[in-house]
Image (cartoon, rainbow, N blue to C red):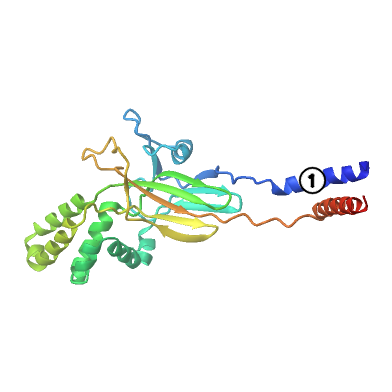
Amino acid sequence: MAGLLNKFVVGASVVVGMSAVVAPAQAAVLGMNGSDYKTYTHDINNLWVGGEGAAIDALTDGDLTTNVELNYTGESDDKNVGFTAVAGDYTVNVSSVTDAEFLTFQDKWVADLMDAYAPLKAVWGGLSSNVQTIAKNMFTGVVGSGDVNVAEFSLDETGAISMQTMGFFDLKPRVNMMIGAALSNQMTAMLFGAELNALSGALGQIDALQISEIAKVTINGQSEYVYGFNATNSGFVALDDVAGKSYSGVYAWSKAGQPPVAAVPEPSTMLGLMAVGGLFAAAKRKANKA
């Protein structure tokens, strides 16, 4: 009986061990890549600071009022500046986007923009290639594709990613201002006035024009370009923006992780389960003889 009891205890402990579930860790190792970045602190007395420590804190502090601007100086968009996160088997690099990279997916970006805003899509096909080019420059110019501001980032051991970037809640006033500036040129107004007015009319049918900055996200060596056309109101604006519009919009992006692969039981585990099975079989035989 003592032997059977010992087998039962061992077997039961094996079963309990197999059923334990460990939640994926949320922390990721972060390190900055390149030096052209700066951290916005939302502290009027010390608004922009340098250093890797401040940047990592801003990316992981759960506070949207702080962010890291990648490719901070000049916005020449000729280099990738970003950070690396590691968790489990996943290595993720997030960086700014170069002009050369943007050209490789510009057509898809424009198509996605049109799909997001039906009034723009309705007039786009009727615009000449010259006006389409002018409009593309306006849309990308008001956003700035190469100096993304990342407010929050997380990666867990399943590969699940969450990122929030800061931008404008409504870019429509800025685009309309650019259209007005173009129309103030007599030659431009004469050649493209009707088309630019049609573009402005389409914008008038949109409640808010929301276009995020673009980030390059590389997961275990596979890259994709991340952007969106849907913002939530941040509830604040940048303290150094006299117009009071910067950081008014929050753009969120996430990627689901992979469920953990079920572990194959070790031979010692199988022996423990067999011991449990033998115990119950012996108990059943004894009960039948009673």
In which quadrant is the N terminus drawn?
top right
Q: Is residue 151 above or below residue 267?
A: above
Disc 1 is placed on an element classified as helix
Q: Which residue is mark 1?
A: 12
User: Which of these two is toward me, 229 or 8?
Assistant: 8
Is residue 52 found left or right of 117 in the rendered image?
A: right
State which quadrant residue 202 falls in. bottom left
Q: Residue at x 25, y 42 (%)?
A: 245
* Residue lying farthest to the front in this orientation: 290
Residue 208 percent across, percent down from the top left: 23, 52
Q: Against 25, is 159 above or below? A: below
Residue at left offset 10%, top offset 59%: 183
Q: Position of residue 240 (x, y in %)?
A: 27, 36
Q: With 163 as the anchor, is 44 left or right in this view?
A: left
Q: Residues within 10 Å of mark 1 (few under 14, many from 20)?
A: some
Q: Which of the pair 28/158 is nearer the observer?
A: 158
Q: Residue at x 32, y 41 (%)?
A: 234
Image coordinates of residue 6 in percent, x first then y, are 88, 42
Q: What's the amino acid at mark 1?
A: Ala
Numbered disc total? 1
